[in-house]
Amino acid sequence: MHILALANQKGGCGKTTAAINLAAALAAHGERVLLVDLDPQGHATLGLGHDPAATSARLDTVLLGHEPAAALLLEAPGSFTLLAGGPCLAEFEARAEQGIDASAALARALAPLAERYDWCVLDCPPRADGVLTLNALRACDTVLLVVETGAFALQGALRAREIFRAALESLGRSAANAPRLRVLATLFDRRTRFAREVLVAMHARFGADLFDTAIRSHVRLREAAAWGLPVRELDASCPAAEDFDHLAAELLERAPGAARAVLTPRRRRRRGAVVPRVDKP
């Protein structure tokens, strides 16, 4: 299982949207995918049709070691699995401040699921120094820095990269055992010269660490969130769905074991992956 942490030190960059729709796109490529909502606001949980305040699946109990993650898995529209977050995570943060080695809780919780999934997508809170983000950084194989192509985007991305590098070093994850830190451009409006110039500058600065795929702004992304669906479940032909398909393909091309065959839905079912049925609006 390759663990991918989507992170930034600020909100409003399209991080949760990217987490939901990347999970769905990877699943559409035949991968077995788990999405973990690490944000106390529970936006990924809400964006998949679950009320983060009402769900009985309490991620804090998993992180505290009171029950296994496998007992709390929820089906998500788009043929992947959700480990829901929400306000309960604030309780974990409060307890973790008094604990020893609290940053290892997520890695311990996910270890029993390693053979069950090909990918685990972590939707991190919009801060770099909290215990939940530190858990994600300790557990992950790749940090995906999500950056909107707006004003001050390049400066913000450079600063965020240094913040996350420092956090990784504080966890002892440097040099040989450090996760790859990559950059994803989001909220891209190709119609504007400014956005195009920002993207060119990001390519010049980050080089191969920046994904070739940039996620375009599209009204369908907002509509899909309102319906509690990944965008491909609402309109698989829209540009935003195509962008996430391309992003998933990029990830799969570079991931360990990329040569494995792409699975059809029938073959996915034979491997035990859940393929839930969801009525489209």
Image (cartoon, rainbow, N blue to C red):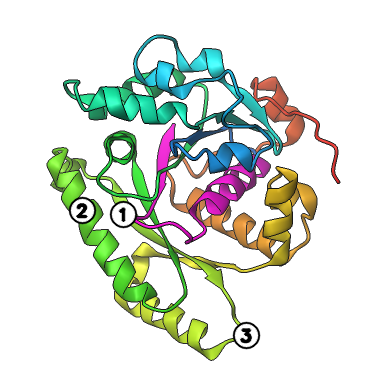
Q: Is residue 197 left or right of residue 264?
A: left
Who comes first in sequence, dot 3 or dot 1?
Answer: 1
Looking at the image, which residue is at 24% across and 30% down? 103
Who comes first in sequence, dot 1 or dot 2?
Answer: 2
Measured as percent of width and height from the top left, residue 28 is found at 68, 43
Q: Is residue 215 left or right of residue 7?
A: right
Task: Please indicate, yes or no, whether residue 262 appears anywhere in the rendered image.
Answer: no
Query: Which type of secondary structure does the marked residue at label 3 adopt?
Result: loop
Write down the quadrant of residue 125 in the picture. Answer: top left
How many C-alpha atoms fall within 10 Å of the one at disc 2: few (<14), some, or many (≥20)?
Answer: some
Residue 191's tag is 3
Question: What amino acid type should be assigned to the residue bearing mark 3?
Answer: Arg
Write down the quadrant of residue 55 in the picture. Answer: top right
Could you tell me if the residues under marks 3 and 1 are in contact, i.e. CB atoms within 8 Å?
Answer: no
- Foreground mark, 1 or 2, reads 2
Q: CA distance from mark 2 to mark 3?
A: 34 Å
Measured as percent of width and height from the top left, residue 264 is found at 72, 36
Looking at the image, which residue is at 39% across and 61% down? 183
Q: CA distance from mark 3 to mark 1?
A: 29 Å
Who comes first in sequence, dot 2 or dot 3?
Answer: 2
**Disc 1 marks which residue?**
181
Residue furthest bottom in the image:
193
**Disc 2 marks which residue?**
165
